[in-house]
Every structure is written in C-alpha cells, then in structure tokens.
Amino acid sequence: QVQLVESGGGLVQAGVSLRLSCAASGRTISSAAMGWFRQAPGKGREFVAAISWSGSSTYYAKSVKGRFTISRDNARNTVYLQMNSLKPEDTAVYYCAARTYREVSTNEKQYDYWGQGTQVTVSS
C-alpha cells in the first residue's frame, strides 16, 4: 500500500507563493510518475501538473504553466508543487497522486493512489 500526505496549503493573498509537499510512505515513489490535481468548490477534479519517475519530464495545465513548478526528490520520497503568482482562481483542494508506471499522465483515471488533499485559498 502507498500512502500520500499533502501539506503546505493555506490562506494567502493573490500574487504570493506557496509550496505544497506530498510525502509518500509504504513504498518508494522512485518508479512512479506523480501528479497534482485540484478541485474547486462545485467543480470537477482538474489536472494541474505531472512529473515522470526520473523528474526529466513535466507537464502542466495551461492555466498554471509558467507559474507552477512540479519537482520531486525520490531519495526523500517527496514531490513538491511550487505555486507562484497565485490567483483567486487557484483556490481549490489540491491532491497528490501516484501511478504505478514511470510515464506521466494527465488523466486522473490512470493514477492509483491519492492523498487526502490540502486546501489552498487565495484571497483578492
């Protein structure tokens, strides 16, 4: 079993930064592609960013490209999401996810493990 725990969310003003962390336990994430998704109130889950097992390939949703950066530290079994220039539209619960393959995916159905989520609220 793989457990994922997100942290780093909070309430911030627009234009500032947050860094989310996702700590994995139970298994190493070295061979797993990782992703971040988010869900705003009343909306479906949305892809945010993904990273391959080695960290060499990354993908971003158009809405966050240039502002968010996904990274990973396999030795620490942790994946990060650096969020800069936050906007009120970024307000959502952010979920970390892992899939048991090295290739990245933007499809939530292809992810096998999910964290509980961490709330990010961006005020105007």
Image: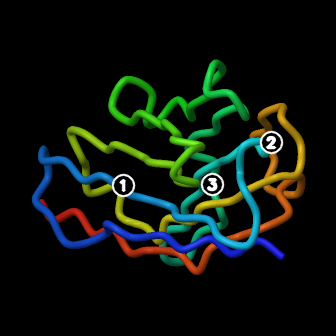
Q: Secondary structure at mark 2?
A: loop
Q: Which mark is residue 11?
A: none
Q: Quadrant of the C terminus?
A: bottom left
- Left or right, 19 with respect to 117, comes to left
The residue at the point 43 percent across, 74 percent down is 118
Q: Which amino acid, by three-letter code, is at mark 2?
A: Ser
x 58%, y 52%: residue: 36
Instruction: Identify the residue shown where x is 75% and y is 40%.
Output: 106
Q: Which residue is mark 1?
A: 90
Query: Residue 31 — which label?
Result: 2
Q: Which x, y percent locates residue 26? A: 73, 72
Foreground residue among 34 and 67: 34
Frontmost of labels 2 and 1 is 2
Q: Position of residue 62 (x, y in %)?
A: 52, 29
Q: Secondary structure at mark 1?
A: helix
Q: Position of residue 61 (x, y in %)?
A: 57, 35
Q: In the rendered view, does 68 fall on the left or right side of 23?
A: left
Mark 1 Cα-neighbour bin, 10 Å: few <14, some 14–19, many ≥20:
many
Under circle 3, the secondary element is strand
| Of pointers 2 and 1, the one earlier in the residue sequence | 2
Q: Which residue lies most toward the front here?
A: 75
Mark 3 belongs to which amino acid? Glu
> CA–CA distance between discs 2 and 1?
29 Å
The structure residue drawn at horizontal position 89% and vertical position 42%, both measured from the top left corner, is: 101
- Location of residue 74 in the rendering, given as x and y in whole percent from the top left corner: 59, 43
For disc 3, the neighbor class at 10 Å (few under 14, some 14 to 19, many from 20) is some
Residue lying at the far top in this picture: please name it.
Answer: 56
Q: Which residue is mark 3?
A: 46
Up-down: is 62 above or below 89? Answer: above
